[in-house]
Amino acid sequence: MRGSGVFPFGRTLPEETPLHRVPAVWKLVFALFASASAFWVRSPFGFFLLVCSALFLSRSSRLSPLFLARNLLYAGVWIGAFAAFSAWGAWEQGVSAAIAAASVVAFRLLFVFWLTLLYTFTTPATEQVAAFARLLRPGKRLGLPVDAVAFSLSLVLTLFPFFLEEGERLRLAFEARGLTFGKRPVEHLRRLALFFSAWFRHFFLRAEETAAALALRGFTGELSFPLREEGEKDPRPLLVPTLCVLAAWVV
């Protein structure tokens, strides 16, 4: 089991673990279904079952929870921002309601980030593209450029951690200039809007630079490598996590 170090988010860990051997498209479908479940489940026992599914996946990946937590450091910006929004919206109902709302939002986002981390750490980039292409294959009949869209979606998973890191740097830059969030609602919203507009601007500039670099290298939207998964595959590590998620829908 990998220890407590930090590994570049968006890259695949070199180990050969049970979760590595699960077909990429199965992992992708499970991640999408489980992420949607996190926003559908309402009961505490349902949340407990989702936690169980995440822990079973972590065990199959042989990654320690501490290692995953350290690699989710930058996700704390997103989680904290949305949890604060939820708490503010529920503040009129009382302190306990605000804490409950913030806790639920924080759990949901942490669960989604956890799944994203496990997927990217155990799925090579070519297999990620192949998985997206298989899911989008019916779109070929409608003229959808499946290869280009699949490549773009896999690239988003790779760039996502840099987006979080950029947000953390912007937050520190705001604090260094004394632009902390105000106590009055209007001032709070104005500075929050300024922060998020700067954040998205930086992200789109990074995306534009990536697109320009791909264009200079002759990328036209058609992939030059075969869209298939390599090696022996075994979907069994997803059995228990899937049952946990299905049970979370029922309770």
Image: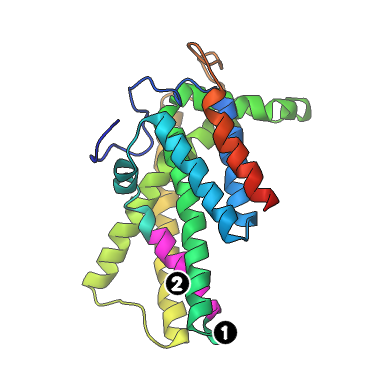
Q: Is residue 145 visible?
A: no
Q: Secondary structure at mark 2?
A: helix
Along the viewing direction, whichever of 212 and 158 lies nearer the viewer? 158
Locate residue 155, reporting x and y percent. 47, 35
- Would residue 230 be found to the left or right of residue 14 on screen? right
Q: Quadrant of residue 221?
A: top right
Q: Mark 2 and mark 1: span between their CA atoms?
A: 15 Å
Which residues, given as a range, are shown in magenta? 77-90
Which residue was labeled with disc 1? 93
Q: Which mark is residue 67?
A: none
Q: Residues within 10 Å of mark 2 (few under 14, many from 20)?
A: some
Check if residue 88 falls in the magenta segment. Answer: yes
At label 1, which amino acid type do we have? Gln
**What amino acid does circle 2 point to?**
Ala
The residue that disc 2 covers is 84
What is the image's colouring?
Answer: rainbow
Residue sitting nearer the eye, 65 or 214: 65
Q: Position of residue 72 (x, y in %)?
A: 35, 48
Residue located at (53% from left, 20% from top): 223
Q: Is residue 133 above or below residue 37?
A: above
Q: Is residue 164 visible?
A: yes
